[in-house]
Image: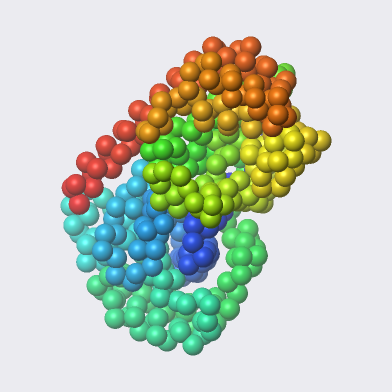
C-alpha cells in the first residue's frame, strides 16, 4: 500500500486561492465565504462529513465563473444570471467521484428560497449547504473588507433580514444573525487564522500518489476548460513529461509525480483573465507581464501543499531556461533539476505541436528546427531534447491521442452545459 502523503484540504485551498487571484477585488472571497459558512453550518449540528463538504463547496463555489467579467459581475448583490456559472462549476467538479456531493452543492448555490420547489420539480434537491453558501456569499459581497467591518454588520444584517423567506432560507438567516453577533468572526479574517480553524475542524484526509493523481486531473480539467485556446494543453504536457521521465529512467513514483506536475503546471493561469488568454493579436507589454505571472502563482501556491515533494518546482519552473534567461526567477542550470528541465521541454514541445483554434500544430521538421535552436542557445536541456527527438514518433502519437480525447471531452462538456442551461 502506498504511503498517504498529501492533505486533501491543501489541494482544495490551492485551487481556491488560484481562483481568487484574478482580481484584487476578489482576493480572499472563497476562503472568507468558507469560514462564515462553517460557522453557520455548525449552528445546525451538521455531521463532520457534511461540514467538510460544505467548506469544500464554499472554497470552490465560483469555480465555474471562467472570466474576469463573470467574477466581477458576481460582486453585485442581485445577480442577473446566477445559475450559468453554478452549472459550469457543477460539471467541472462532478467527474471526481469523491466530490459528487460537493458538485451538487455548487450547482444550487444561487437558488433562491422561493425557487426551491421549482428545482425540486426538476429532480434537483437544493441542500441546506447550498442555501448556507447562497446567503454567506451575498454577505461577503456586501462587506467592504478594506474598512472597519464591525461598523458594517448592522447594515448587512438588515439587508439579509429583508430577504428572509425570499432570497434566503429563514432558518439560515436566523443562524447567520446569531453568529454575526460574535465580533471575532469579522476581526480574524486573516489567511493564517482561517487555515488554523480549518485544520482544526475539518477531518484531515490524506491522499496517496494515486489519489493525488486523480484529484490533479480535476485541476487540469478546470485549468484547461476555461478557454478553447488551451482546452487540451495540460493533458498533452502531462503525457509528454511522464513519457520523457519514464524513458529517462525515473522511478514509477517519480513518473506519476511528473504527470501530476504536468496536470498542475498552469494552475497559475486561473489568475490570468480569460480575456487575455483569448485576445486576438499580440499582447501589449503590460498584458504579457500579467500572463507571465502565472508561473510564479503556480510555484508559490503549490509550494504550500504539504507532502508535495519536488512537484512545485517541476511545475513552477517550466518557463525557466538553462542559460538563466527564463522567468519568473531567472534560475540557472545548476538550480534546475532534471524534472524541471523535462517539464520545460514538454511544455514547449506540446505548445508548438498541438492544434489551437487559430492555427494547426507545427510539422515535425519545424518542431525540430525550433527545439534544436533552443538547445543550441542553451535555453532547453539538450540531452532531454535528444531523448524526445529519438522517440518523437511514439511520443507525438501518444500526445495526439491524449489531446484528441481531451478535445472530445471539452466539446461534450460544453454541449451538455448548453443543453441543460436551456432548460433553466
Viewer-side residue, 141 vs 372: 372
Residue 404 drawn at (x, y percent):
40, 23
Q: Quadrant location of residue 175? A: bottom left
Q: Does the image show residue 190?
A: yes
| Colour basis | rainbow
Spot the residue most to the right: 334
> Relative to residue 100, is residue 137 depicted above or below?
below
Which residue is depicted at the point 24% across and 60% down?
Answer: 116
Residue 416 drawn at (x, y percent):
27, 38
Which residue is depicted at the point 37% across and 77% down?
Answer: 174
Which residue is depicted at the point 40% across and 46% down?
Answer: 279
410 on left or right of 299:
left
Q: Does the image show residue 311?
A: no
Residue 102 drawn at (x, y percent):
42, 50
Viewer-side residue, 21 vs 123: 21
Image quadrant containing the N terminus:
top right
Which residue is depicted at the point 58% across and 32% down?
Answer: 347
Give the total of numbered labels.
0
> Relative to residue 386, is residue 147 depicted above or below?
below
311 on left or right of 78:
right
10 on left or right of 322:
left
Amino acid at each position: 500500500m502506498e504511503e498517504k502523503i498529501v492533505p486533501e484540504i491543501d489541494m482544495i485551498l490551492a485551487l481556491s486561492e488560484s481562483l481568487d487571484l484574478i482580481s484584487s477585488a476578489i482576493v480572499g472571497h472563497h476562503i472568507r465565504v468558507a469560514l462564515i459558512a462553517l460557522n453557520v453550518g455548525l449552528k445546525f449540528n451538521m455531521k463532520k462529513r457534511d461540514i467538510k463538504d460544505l467548506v469544500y463547496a464554499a472554497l470552490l463555489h465560483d469555480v465555474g465563473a471562467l472570466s474576469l467579467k463573470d467574477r466581477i459581475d458576481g460582486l453585485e448583490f442581485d445577480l442577473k444570471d446566477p445559475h450559468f456559472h453554478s452549472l459550469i462549476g457543477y460539471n467541472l467538479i462532478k467527474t471526481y467521484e469523491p466530490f459528487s456531493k460537493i458538485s451538487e452543492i455548487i450547482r444550487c448555490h444561487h437558488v433562491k428560497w422561493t425557487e426551491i420547489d421549482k428545482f425540486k420539480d426538476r429532480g434537483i434537491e437544493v441542500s441546506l449547504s447550498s442555501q448556507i453558501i447562497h446567503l454567506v456569499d451575498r454577505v461577503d459581497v456586501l462587506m467592504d473588507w478594506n474598512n472597519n467591518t464591525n461598523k458594517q454588520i448592522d447594515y448587512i444584517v438588515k439587508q439579509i433580514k429583508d430577504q428572509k423567506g425570499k432570497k434566503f432560507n429563514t432558518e439560515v438567516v436566523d443562524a447567520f444573525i446569531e453568529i454575526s453577533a460574535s465580533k471575532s468572526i469579522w476581526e480574524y479574517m486573516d489567511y493564517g487564522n482561517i487555515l488554523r480553524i480549518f485544520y482544526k475542524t475539518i477531518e484531515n484526509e490524506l491522499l496517496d500518489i494515486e489519489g493525488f493523481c486523480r484529484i490533479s486531473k480535476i485541476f487540469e480539467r478546470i485549468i484547461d476548460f476555461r478557454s478553447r485556446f488551451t482546452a487540451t494543453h495540460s493533458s498533452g504536457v502531462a503525457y509528454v513529461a511522464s513519457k520523457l521521465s519514464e524513458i529517462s529512467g525515473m522511478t514509477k513514483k517519480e513518473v506519476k509525480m511528473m504527470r501530476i506536475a504536468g496536470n498542475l503546471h498552469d494552475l497559475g493561469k486561473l489568475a490570468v483573465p480569460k480575456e487575455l488568454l483569448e485576445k486576438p493579436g499580440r499582447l501589449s507589454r503590460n498584458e504579457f507581464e500579467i500572463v507571465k505571472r502565472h508561473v510564479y502563482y503556480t510555484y508559490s501556491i503549490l509550494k504550500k501543499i504539504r507532502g508535495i515533494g519536488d512537484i512545485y518546482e517541476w511545475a513552477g519552473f517550466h518557463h525557466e531556461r538553462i542559460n538563466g534567461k527564463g522567468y519568473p526567477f531567472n534560475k540557472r542550470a545548476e538550480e534546475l533539476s532534471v524534472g524541471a528541465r523535462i517539464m520545460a521541454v514538454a511544455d514547449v514541445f506540446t505548445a508548438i505541436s498541438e492544434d489551437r483554434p487559430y492555427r494547426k500544430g507545427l510539422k515535425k521538421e519545424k518542431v525540430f528546427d525550433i527545439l534544436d535552436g533552443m538547445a543550441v542557445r542553451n535555453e532547453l536541456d539538450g540531452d532531454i531534447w535528444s531523448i524526445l527527438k529519438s522517440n518523437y514518433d511514439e511520443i507525438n502519437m501518444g500526445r495526439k491521442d491524449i489531446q484528441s480525447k481531451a478535445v472530445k471531452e471539452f466539446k461534450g462538456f460544453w454541449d451538455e452545459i448548453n443543453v441543460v442551461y436551456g432548460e433553466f
